[in-house]
Amino acid sequence: MKPSILLILLIGFAIALPATGGNLTDDTAVNIGYTPKTVNTEASTVRNIGSVELSYDSNDIEVGPVRDDPGADWIRYDDGNPRSLYPTADNWSRTRFTPIADFMLWGVRLQPLNQGPNFEDACEVRVYAEDQNSHDLGDLLWEGEIAELAEIDFDNFENSWNWIELGEDERLEFGAYESFSIIYGPAPGGNYDPNNMNQGDGWWNLFDGAVSDPPRSFQSAGAVPADHDSWQQLSGDLFIRANGEYLDDYIDVAVTGLFNEAEQWLVLPETEQNIVARIENIGNNVQDLLVTFMVYTLDYEPYWNESVGMIIESIDAQEEIEVTCDSTFSSAEVGHFIIEVAVDAQEDSDPDNNIMTMEQIVFDPTDVENDFWVGYCGETRTSGTNGDANTGWITAFGHPGGENPLMVRKFRQFLISDNAVDCRFRIAVYDGGQRYNWMWEGEAQCNNPEGEWVEVELGEDEMETTTYGEGEEAWICYFYSGIAVQLDGNAPVAGVNDDMPVAMHITQNGGDGASPAGTGDYMCQAMFGITQPTGKMLRIEPDPVSFGDSLNTFTEYNLQATFTAFGDQDVEISAMQIGGTAGDYLTIDPMVFTIAAQTEQTVSLRFYADEVVDLEARVRIINDSDNLSHQYIWEINASALGVDDYQVRLPNDFELMQNHPNPFNPTTNIDFALKTAGMVNFGVYDINGRQVSEVVNGQMSAGYHTVEFDAAGLPAGIYVYRITAGDFTSVRKMALIK
């Protein structure tokens, strides 16, 4: 997982414009960046923005106000990571709040960027009722003023919040799902000068890059318009938070994170990934939370035949947990896959935060015959971003793992231009630490007012300069060339998933430093190929080899392994030495052979035991390969039980297993183990304890058993199944979905 956020002011500015591009206007957004890791920097750094130097320290800090200061509950939509601001004069900022239960508003926190140098600009704060259908502003319910806004403290962002509290007799009550608006302004603006951030009095409106769905943050210049359509939607959430108290008990469980344990966006075919969801209980204690994982193709056709459901028996109020999916994700085919997690609790007040998606990209760099574009972006463009000739936008492509180095074969960027423009591109290799190196630079022309994919194909010598290996990333960068880089806004986006490696960066000063962009995904895609390693390169699969842990004696077991010479020279295996007494049970054939370059050799393994044995063999492979250092220890495991083919293996204890599949519709299988024969009662009950089915009631033999439960006539919901066998009783839960 990522370290704590380090709040760092990005080098320079990048101006967010409509997709058609244009010059800086009063409606222009200026992107500022913060990053959890720095590149080419020390802990204390000075960076130039025009002629002004800004110093800061990289500190691990907490972001946002504490939850119980002074009210018990907060409604917030920002993600705690400010990335952009509007320098518009006379601007009003607005966020629409929708409580999920009856709510009493106690006060407001807000956070404009006060640019100074005089911090005496008053700020009006107002609360309006809303028309629940049109979202037009209704009655003015409350107004107040902050006499002097706090200066933004980039070293301790928590100190920069402005707080205004309603008096006890002024507090406002709202019903569940009754929207209201908090606005502040009018922003005095100041004289914007890109070379002098501190010029002029005034303050700008700070927001993040993670857009709420539906959108909740807006801005308007001039008088406050009552008509909702007169407000301009922002490409992110303003830093306005409503503080107060929920008046009733309520249930609200939210998915707050989704990632794979390997933290890899790009994987090779048949690579297994453990999927993890982070779940937060925002409301009161919850029993029997259903967590469901599903995988789709990019057009949302189911890739998994059925979802994987898991029941969390309880999650306490304000508790955050991580849930790992029972099934791993892997695909033998290349493609873009959508991983989805959903949570379901009875009487959940806010279903809008119950689902999260992320993308997993499977690609095969050895397949250069079939063009497969790798990228994080969708086909829908939402905005464009530009800057100056020294500003660039980087899409990072991490190595998917394995010994084969990759190289960039070609890439493309979607750009829009009214005139023929030579666009400048660069490619860097980043080692995952503090350094990256520019390896290639080139140009391609764009001339299409409707937009087009500008494609660049690298020559053989150029491709070799982009070579990168495991643990490294290829950074493909478009430097501002007079036309805006395009972004998409489609979920799932790699640019705002803080649990996965940073996929989108901004770089300034010609590429001397870079910071995560924290926005949507840049419209950049690439194709990759493998470079053939030089020398004698050996790979052995599988390693370790396991015959299993429940084998019979007097029975022969056979497996195969593959030895591959993946370099440009032959590899010689001169001996295999089986350690200890393992040679009495293990046979390997052949044990001496030569593998031609770019070919593989199949090796047969045989395990046979005439007695109980727990084999953990260490086989020393003597070879002349470069990457295995001429000697390689190969592990081979097997365990034979003291039974033969005519004996039945009995369980050591009673056990009731989880039903499968779960959730199910309408049938499911339930396994259980009986240590001894006897009377067995097996029943299914609803959540209120009423028996809905008697599955078994009679004598059963010792051993392993499976029963099928058919719930065709039952409503969807949580059910309990219980087994009683002698003194043994066990209960489990299962979920019926329809």
Image (cartoon, rainbow, N blue to C red):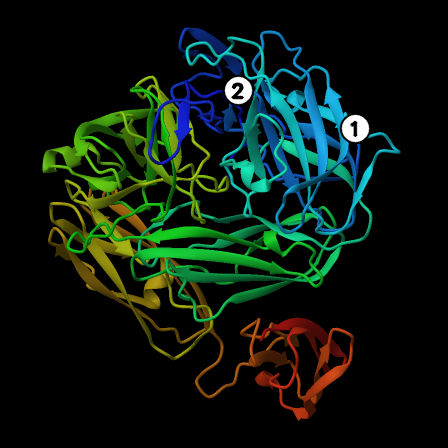
Q: Distance from label 2 to label 1 (Cα)?
A: 32 Å
Nearer-the-camera pick, 501 or 404 = 501
Indicate the quadrant where residue 656 lies: bottom right
Q: Which residue is mark 2?
A: 58
Type of amino acid under label 2: Ser
Q: Where is residue 69? Give x, y as percent.
A: 77, 31
Nearer-the-camera pick, 551 or 383 = 383
Please identify the residue farthest to the bottom as the structure is shown. Answer: 698
- How many marks are shown on the rendered structure? 2
Type of amino acid under label 1: Glu
Give the mark nearest the N terminus, 2 or 1.
2
Nearer-the-camera pick, 669 or 718 = 718
Q: Secondary structure at mark 2?
A: loop
User: For the residue carrying disc 1, how many other residues have a C-alpha within 10 Å: few (<14), some (14-19), or many (20+)?
Assistant: some
Q: Which residue is mark 1?
A: 165
Asked if residue 363 lies left or right of residue 738, the reply is: left
Q: Where is residue 28? Give x, y as percent.
A: 45, 26
Examine the rendered structure and indicate whether residue 135 appears above or below residue 288: above
Please identify the residue farthest to the right as the structure is shown. Answer: 169
Q: Secondary structure at mark 1?
A: strand
Examine the rendered structure and indicate whether residue 294 appears above or below residue 197: below
Q: Residue at x 49, y 36 (%)?
A: 235
Q: Is residue 280 visible?
A: yes
Q: Residue at x 56, y 75 (%)?
A: 664
